Amino acid sequence: MEDSQKISTLAQKIYITLRMMELYNVTIGMPVYNVESYIENSLRSALDQEFLGTIEILIVDDCSTDNSISIINYLKTTHPQGQNIHIISKPINSGVGLARNTIIEKARGKYLFFLDSDDYITKNCIQKLYSLAEENQAEVVFGAIKTVNTRGEEIDCNQKFLNQPDLIIDGKDGLGKYAFQDTHAHLRDYMVNILFNLDFLNKNKLRYPTIRFHEDVIFSANLIPCVNKAVLLSDITYAYVIRNNSLSNYQGRQRIELEEIQKFFDIYSYVKDKNKSLKDKPYYETRCARCMSQIFFIVCGVLKNRAIIIPPIKNHQIKEVLKHPASLYEIFCFKKYRTINLFYYLLGILPAYFSMNIITLIGKRKKLI
């Protein structure tokens, strides 16, 4: 009798737990921090989705000090879909990356979609991405993006890879081969307007790093080698809002802290060094060349703005980021991009003074400095 009571009690607990774990087709995750001017438009775009399934809107309040959460609570009580808004409050401000980790851990949808709280999506966004994910059993579905200003006017941010094709990528390393088909960017490395299979993220233990900006760069570097089934959609389903005070806008700076530059170097050094674990990939040689090209452009930007970096950055500090991830022997064995990889390898081993002069000369000719 005692055993049967225990079984009955356990069954009740399991039933209650399953009820509490009410599953949705899609979780839209939104980190929120002081976006009172944008949050209503962003959240309404999620609430007004023309979707045949169920959507959970999971908001992480990263210690907002303005009226953002009041606006969210108003929509929660007045909008017909407001009951699907769930708010998690963080005890301290920890940044977008850790807020997104919280969303991954707490999401109850089969799929997960990140929406930045100053951007917005089209009414058919989730339906289009979800249909493609289900039809193709995809791990990730990329929707196309347009960039707009705060008035909603489309602007050209000179990122041609945002105009992606309609494409189904199937098979191991397929997404990597697409992303690194040559040294140009073919796939964005910011993680909005992508429908992720949540089981896929958890199975591969994909999480964001504990950094304050460009966290998507590292997440993307870890994501791409894991994907075996992806879909790209050419239809624009997301508006990426460029605003003057956003973290992604660094124009018009009068002073740049050396610590910020070092963090930037650390991020792209991580991406570069990721190559060391990808030597068996068919896109390894191309990825090496592309990573080093990215770092070359970053170094050009540092040299261009050297006069306003405080305290001053030294040549040897810049040279550290130029070290090539491959050995000289490996590069001589490359079948693709051997010359460009060899050039970057030499930049990394020459005395810092000579490396900086070579980069400055090339940078000026290409009008990067």
Image: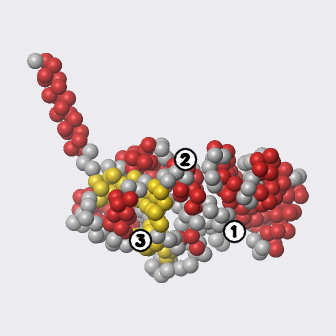
Judge the density around disc 3: few (<14), some (14-19), many (≥20) Cα neighbours within 10 Å. many
Residue type beneath disc 1: Gln
What numbered label is drawn on residue 225?
A: none
Q: Earlier in the sequence, mark 2 or mark 1?
A: 2
Secondary structure under the numbered disc 1 in the rendered image: loop
Q: Which mark identifies residue 254?
A: 1
Residue at x 49%, y 74% (from the top left corner): 146
Q: Nearer the viewer, mark 2 or mark 1?
A: 2
Q: Which residue is mark 2?
A: 210
Marks 3/2: CA–CA distance: 29 Å
- Quadrant placement of the C terminus: bottom right
For badge 2, the amino acid type reads Thr
Residues 291 and 261: in front is: 291
What distance separates the C-alpha of mark 2 from that of mark 1? 27 Å
Kindly indicate the quadrant of the structure image that contains residue 44: bottom left
Q: Which residue is the site of mark 3?
A: 237
Q: Residues within 10 Å of mark 2 (few under 14, many from 20)?
A: few
Question: At 66% from the left edge and 64% from the top edge, which residue is drawn?
Answer: 182
Who is closer to the viewer here, 339 or 126? 339
Residue drawn at the location 10% of the way across and 18% of the way down: 1
Q: Is residue 87 left or right of residue 360?
A: left
Does residue 324 appear to the left or right of 239 in the view shown? right
Of pointers 3 and 1, the one earlier in the residue sequence: 3
Identified at 20% across, 39% down, the residue is 16
Q: In the image, what residue type sits under mark 3? A: Thr
Q: Determine whether 316 is above or below 296 in the image.
A: above
Q: Is label 2 in a helix, a strand or a loop?
A: loop
